[in-house]
Amino acid sequence: MILENIKSPADVKKLKATELDTLATEMRQALIQKISRCGGHCAPNLGIVEATIALHYVFESPKDKIVYDVSHQSYSHKMLTGRAEAFLNENKYGSVTGYTEPNESEHDHFMVGHTSTSVSLALGLATARDIKGEKGNVIAVIGDGSLSGGEAFEGLDNAGEYATNFIVVVNDNEMSIAENHGGLYGSLAELRATNGKSENNYFKSLGFDYIYVEQGNDIQALIAAFTQVKDSSKPVVVHIHTLKGKGYSFAEQNKEGFHWSAPFNIETGVVDWGSGESWSGILSNYLMAKIKADPNVVVIHSAVPAGIGFFAPQRKEAGKQFIDVGIAEEHAVALASGLAKGGAKPIYSTHSTFIQRTYDQLSQDLCANNNPATLLITMSGADGMNDTTHLCIFDIAMMSNIPNLAYLCPTCVEEAKAMMDYAVDQTKCPMAIRIPNSVAHREGEFDKDYSKVTYKIDKLGSKVAIIALGDFYKRGEAVASELAKRGIDATVINPRFASGVDAELLESLKANHQVVVTLENGVTAGGFGQKIATFYGDASMKVLVKGLKKEFYDKVSFEDLCKSNRLNPEQIAEDVTSMLS
Amino acid sequence: MILENIKSPADVKKLKATELDTLATEMRQALIQKISRCGGHCAPNLGIVEATIALHYVFESPKDKIVYDVSHQSYSHKMLTGRAEAFLNENKYGSVTGYTEPNESEHDHFMVGHTSTSVSLALGLATARDIKGEKGNVIAVIGDGSLSGGEAFEGLDNAGEYATNFIVVVNDNEMSIAENHGGLYGSLAELRATNGKSENNYFKSLGFDYIYVEQGNDIQALIAAFTQVKDSSKPVVVHIHTLKGKGYSFAEQNKEGFHWSAPFNIETGVVDWGSGESWSGILSNYLMAKIKADPNVVVIHSAVPAGIGFFAPQRKEAGKQFIDVGIAEEHAVALASGLAKGGAKPIYSTHSTFIQRTYDQLSQDLCANNNPATLLITMSGADGMNDTTHLCIFDIAMMSNIPNLAYLCPTCVEEAKAMMDYAVDQTKCPMAIRIPNSVAHREGEFDKDYSKVTYKIDKLGSKVAIIALGDFYKRGEAVASELAKRGIDATVINPRFASGVDAELLESLKANHQVVVTLENGVTAGGFGQKIATFYGDASMKVLVKGLKKEFYDKVSFEDLCKSNRLNPEQIAEDVTSMLS
């Protein structure tokens, strides 16, 4: 086996052409084997095996610096830079992350997980090189889906006026996560159709030199192209046409399904997505019903429509009432604002980690204009994705401090539906709804009107009041049970709104309570509980704010996070009890 | 006079060609007259007079919807849509804002002030029109400087695949605020040089039809072009070549200086920028000295280099150590991260209101990677720009809750220099420094080490502790004076860090103090004081958090803001006193 002897890129350079092809086959087998067991980004990595081999054959990493966009396509890169064992030895599968990670290797320069960043980051390295009078190539690798993100454009546009070595490899696999969206993809298609000769050339229009490689899974063609641009003294784009999912028929056929895949059966291609209710299924049904009931409803997504269960059949069924803008979160928020202003009923959904791209659009385009769009912030909280680059724990702090925006946190599916019903039809202000990872149900009636910040006392006790936000509501109930064991009959409150305080209700607690404890599934810095603590600043009420310490957690399990942040019900009960006089 | 009889766009349509030219002359005179008295966006508005006349001549606003980017070029639009008096009658000068404002007129659709938003917002209107089966043209007007912003690209790229009426007018005056930056401007220049025929066509590469108007200040040429695209059923760009500052020689010659101008003498062209020390002057000198002392220092700005006093001579002197990326804040932050990773010492500066564009880049590209870039957040606080669209009061809440980022708030020029000296040379983490509007000086020594969150007790008293952040430090001292009159010897603390708490110091206050009051020049929601209130949640210490209520204030004077938020020293002293038992 060749792959197990690749200890560094220098070992790749020693191989003959046929050996390079064998290496590609071995790498592909290792990828399929590992991902079928552990899950991971499958189809994107299968498509870029040959390009990665060619890059390391031609360039001298780490002196030449390769920067991966999103970096979910860096599995092959890891195999060739001293980390092959993490893909060959089952016991070592956990020894590398799914993204580039400077702590793992000198060949990785940034920890990245959001898209469209590689050009700007790499241009920083190139500029530092020039300022310091150093030598070497800087190569940004970007998937074509990432080209629709504004940050990538800003980077390309700025790079286009530099007169220095800067190489951008555009890995064009004709896909984003789902189909590509945007006029740009029309001209990429023209470039593919004309073997790179079309006049409509986005990269040239930004000042880049340009070469096209039709056989983007042919190692020798890629080596020739990379050799041609090596040590170039001008910015140049190498546009390579690859096959997403290459070499694994099920992934080639179902590119979207295998973009990120749960563990799967290699023989049958059946992915084990787990069973049971999921928020994507719930949202898919809910949103489709809304679309059918009201022709003014428009559902918007930015490239990950599976997040709301909108796969190809649902997208087709929704017709014009569904818009996938591609990876373009900023535009999505502004578009939603314009739609609401124009009298439609837009519902934009994205994961908590990706709404981070839109702080200014939320503030300026949407909230300053107070247009009544609805936002669904999915996967929120610490119990879902736990890569540093995909944490979903900052949205409360980011969103709840923007004026005019109501940020609602439902405690269960039934309440989420009541909130969505209200948000979509109202015309008072923009409303965001925090959709958690876990699916919970509660019985009873839920309010139909969310026009005013009001908390709800679900159980009135005394001494201790537990204000438990959103999906931490059930945890709040568990805290109450723990306190009951200690002889304390705690009040349990569902605050519903992360974005404001219910002064009247909080005031009323003073009579009969000594301690208020707040619970939220996110960082406490800038978040919900701190508003409650501030409210009681002039009172004798003691306040305990429970949530996560502000930190970039890296692959920490939810259980460990809860324990170290003292979020387990018995820990909270203990802390509360010690505050009672 | 024709202008004073223009009550709505219908009146424009009645005019003959020569009358339209006369109207343009009258409008230009009114613009110069008003801006010379009140200040405002001078050169951009002078350049777009003819295009505005032609737009209203050809289209039927408000049925046809015109959406202005930044909307600082909407003065002429206001004149032609029932608001001429606000430019002709000195007593009415204050009756309109400097940006489009839906509350003023049905011809204004959005309140906007940040750039690069018009395409996305207008596309929302166009999509709502189509969903609802309505008719009419939607026109996004965008200045070429705004094209470098990622949001504009995302909007254009998405629009490029629509098969519907959508018109984008690109007002190409060959300038951003300073010179244009980005490879795109090379191809715009080619389009100008070839009368629109160059192959390098950014707009076509995104799927747009395209027409070019060389005589962008010729009303009849513009009318012909707009008539040609009216009711188009495909997205089309009308690229018009205009002269920034047209008709006022001083503005034509000094386009950057007259982009936004303070009041000026019409005869001499001398602008009254006021006298005395300014932060832009201080930063200019400081940064130039840094550049000269250390070849690894790279100063980055995003299109408003005047903000750090880098005008043409300074930019030339700084050479490669100064980078203006154009309007591309996201890229600027990622570029700074890459530069820091590559061993350079990047210093990126932008106004508080514009750093909002970069929440995700701060979090992901910079802070998760913990690269030691320095950020200078200028114009911060409520005492500077007070348009809703340019408020500088949200940066503490936005930035101080991002892990790894130290957000420093100097109390005076001397402390700011000490903090910048430390930040630029350290390699521990990204550091941001909040530069206020007002220039203050203090005597004494300032720390040279800001590696750890430590507050500083400048005066130790008892009972009441005043923790006064950044430029509100002097206000804190004034509160202490007020309290002294009431017989209270208050402690005065300079916290220096907005981004964390000094637990040891706060703990020590418990012994001898009953009330802590925090002061910050920004919204309190998610901000500094709420962290202090949370810290004391389990203690008997009372905490009063002073700052601004979360709100989109609109042209409220600083004095009124302070009064209504009870931020005047005597008000604060009163509130504190009432909390003492």
Image: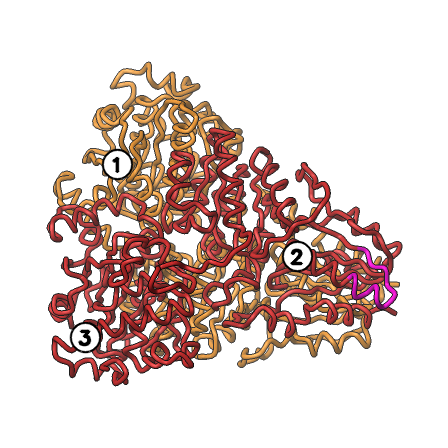
Chain colours: A orange, B red
Cα distance, mark 1 to mark 2? Answer: 45 Å
Q: Which residues are magenta?
A: B480-491
Badge 1 and badge 2 both on one subunit: no
Cα distance, mark 3 to mark 1? Answer: 50 Å
Determine which residue is flagged by label 2.
B528
Q: Would residue B251 be counted in the magenta stretch?
A: no
Determine the secondary structure under disc 2: loop
* Host chain of mark 1: A
Q: Which tag is nearer the camera, tag 3 or tag 2?
A: 3
Determine which residue is flagged by label 1.
A237
Residue occupying image coordinates x 24% and y 51%:
A184
Determine which residue is flagged by label 3.
B22
Instruction: Judge by depth and name the residue closer to the eye, A441 or A480.
Output: A480
Determine the secondary structure under disc 1: strand
Q: Residue furthest top?
A: A14
Q: Looking at the picture, how far across and down is residue B441, in whole percent?
A: 65, 50
Image side of residue B270 versus residue A22, left or right: right
